[in-house]
């Protein structure tokens, strides 16, 4: 059915406009003399895309920076699952008419199972059943791969949203049923074979994956191409009583379920570690009325990464919400009483009562499958195309990859980067030779979103625009007069606009160019 939704003259040339037709929200974007029409909300978490950043026909979601093609509705960069539905639009006598088919919705599947080709004899293996592995499998299908796709995932679950565990899941805003990225049969529908045996090692020279025996498969699989993104495990503390029933780590869905159940019954919660997992969990627990103490070896958590001003605002907010943050100290001992932790003794001499303890001291990349050299190096060195050799590609937490436009390689333990690697690796496995040029981005949730785009190994200057005290600002990180990263919070967050500039113009825009436009990157798009 056709709907008259707007006057063509009312659509700005580079704007985004939301209308309603057929009972659904539709996003309109003028493109010269034509109008592009898609679903109006992001397929990831439902953000209103009318508030996104537009660069031509590319759209960046304002919340978590998923990218969509306005001309096709395609989901072209993570996070999230699903594409935007595209609607036929026509301009007749100055009015915009939209065709909305009966039963249409705002979104469509990430991959249409009907497009899965078959009949080929090549075997492409994927090690890791997380977001990166899923992205790789979907991109292989999208690109027409017709051979076997074999995924090794030893946790037995379909890929799920691990980023939610320390955020909305612990806070009770996300349920177990909300976590899966695809339905129970989602991988089966696109012809992905799943093996749950643990991978022991990759023999790259002989293109063989060795693992514990499985009926019908044997002790090894010879592959034509392989993408390995095994992820990480939680780091632990070498302390007596660290294995008590009410001492936890948080990495997997199972970890989250046991931790959440324990937290529901606990009041005094001690978190050891002040990184993202620890501080996100602190925010979740404090928001639910728990008494939370964070133990940090740092003088000011996040200061080494983001500087004293930004770190002070973030940590100050935690303290204002009732979280006790004890700095410059570690854990000397975990006290046990009747088989459970009862208190944590700090190296400062203090004692903190505890009904439960969360150890959040970082991640340990799963490197053993690559051999001793990778374990000693702390990562797997890969080329610009994420390759170790012509048949093996590595991504996610374990990959030390050349960062586009920076002149150095780095390892980035961010979920979205793993998804980017998975999509790119699929194309590389199919013969694409261009280097990986993805822009890193991640988000945190600590009483509101924290957005961070780019990558700053170190920096010369941190320039803050906005109201730092009110939590509405963007902090620009400058190195050699180039803006290499930015952190944004609140209404003054312009990281999506900077992301667009980094994608389409320069991964490290000049400080001078941004100064000239009042640190508003949108004016340079």
Image (cartoon, rainbow, N blue to C red):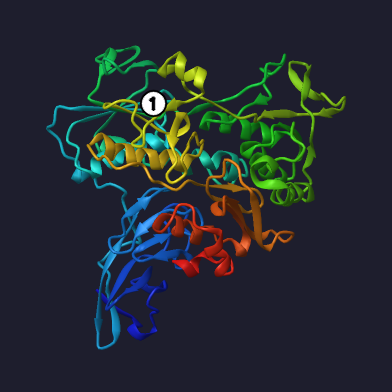
Q: Which residue is mark 1?
A: 153
Q: Secondary structure at mark 1?
A: loop
Residue found at the far bottom of this picture:
93
Tell me, yes or no, if residue 24 can be seen here: no
Q: In the rendered view of the protein, which quadrant contains the N terminus?
A: bottom left
Q: Residue at x 25, y 67 (%)?
A: 101
- The one nearer the camera, 243 or 422, is 422
Quadrant (top left, top right, bottom left, bottom right) of the C terminus: bottom left
User: Looking at this view, is 405 or 301 the one in front?
Assistant: 405
Q: Nearer the viewer, residue 330 or 318?
A: 330
Rendered view: 475 above or below 15: above
Apparent side of residue 93 relative to residue 27 in the rendered image (left or right): left
From the viewer's perspective, is 351 left or right of 237? right
x, y percent for residue 494: 55, 61
Image coordinates of residue 279 in percent, x first then y, are 67, 40
What is the tally of numbered marks visible in this picture? 1
- Image location of residue 256, percent across then percent down: 57, 33
Nearer to the camera, 431 or 346: 431
Mark 1 burial class by Cα count in 10 Å: few <14, some 14-19, many 20+:
many
The image shows residue 307 at horizontal and vertical percentages of 69, 47
Q: Quadrant of residue 488?
A: bottom right
């Amino acid at each position: 059915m056709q709907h008259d939704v707007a006057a063509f003259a009312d659509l700005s040339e580079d704007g985004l406009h939301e209308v309603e037709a057929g009972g659904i929200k539709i996003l309109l974007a003028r493109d010269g003399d034509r109008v592009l029409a898609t679903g109006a909300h992001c397929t990831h978490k439902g953000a209103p895309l009318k508030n996104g950043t537009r660069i031509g026909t590319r759209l960046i979601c304002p919340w978590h920076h998923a990218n969509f093609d306005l001309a096709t509705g395609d989901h072209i960069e993570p996070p999230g699952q699903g594409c935007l539905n595209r609607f036929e639009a026509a301009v007749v006598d100055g009015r915009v008419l939209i065709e909305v088919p009966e039963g249409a919705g705002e979104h469509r599947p990430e991959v249409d199972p009907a497009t899965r080709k078959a009949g080929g004899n090549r075997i492409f293996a994927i090690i890791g059943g997380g977001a990166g592995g899923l992205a790789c499998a979907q991109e292989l299908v999208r690109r027409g791969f017709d051979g076997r796709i074999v995924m090794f995932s030893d946790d037995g679950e379909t890929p799920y949203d691990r980023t939610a565990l320390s955020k909305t899941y612990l806070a009770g805003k996300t349920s177990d049923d909300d976590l899966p990225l695809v339905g129970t049969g989602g991988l089966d529908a696109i012809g992905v074979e799943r093996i749950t045996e643990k991978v022991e090692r990759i023999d790259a020279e002989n293109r063989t994956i060795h693992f514990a025996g499985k009926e019908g498969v044997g002790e090894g699989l010879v592959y034509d191409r392989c993408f390995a993104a095994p992820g990480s495990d939680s780091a632990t503390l070498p302390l007596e009583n660290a294995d008590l029933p009410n001492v936890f780590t948080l990495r997997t869905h199972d970890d989250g379920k046991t931790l959440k159940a324990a937290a529901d019954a606990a009041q005094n919660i001690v978190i050891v570690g002040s990184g993202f997992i620890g501080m996100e969990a602190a925010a979740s627990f404090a928001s639910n009325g728990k008494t939370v103490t964070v133990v940090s070896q740092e003088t000011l958590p996040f200061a080494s990464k983001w500087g004293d001003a930004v770190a002070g605002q973030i940590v100050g907010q935690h303290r204002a919400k009732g979280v006790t943050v004890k700095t410059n100290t570690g854990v000397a001992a975990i006290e046990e009483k009747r088989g459970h932790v009862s208190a944590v003794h700090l190296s400062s001499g203090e004692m903190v009562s505890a009904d439960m303890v969360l150890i959040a001291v970082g991640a340990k990349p799963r490197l053993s499958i690559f051999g001793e050299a990778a374990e000693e190096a702390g990562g797997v060195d890969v080329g610009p195309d994420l390759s170790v050799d012509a048949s093996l590609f590595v991504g996610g937490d374990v990959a030390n990859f050349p960062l586009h436009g920076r002149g150095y390689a780095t390892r980035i333990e961010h979920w979205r980067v793993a998804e980017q690697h998975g999509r790119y690796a699929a194309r590389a496995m199919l013969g694409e030779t261009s280097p990986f040029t993805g822009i890193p981005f991640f988000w945190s949730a600590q009483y509101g979103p924290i957005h961070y785009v780019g990558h700053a190994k170190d920096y010369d200057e941190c320039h803050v625009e906005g109201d730092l005290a009110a939590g509405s600002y963007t902090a620009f990180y400058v190195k050699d007069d180039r803006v290499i990263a930015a952190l944004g919070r609140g209404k003054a967050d312009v990281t999506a606009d900077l992301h667009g500039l980094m994608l389409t113009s320069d991964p490290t825009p000049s400080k001078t160019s941004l100064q000239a436009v009042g640190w508003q990157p949108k004016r340079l798009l």
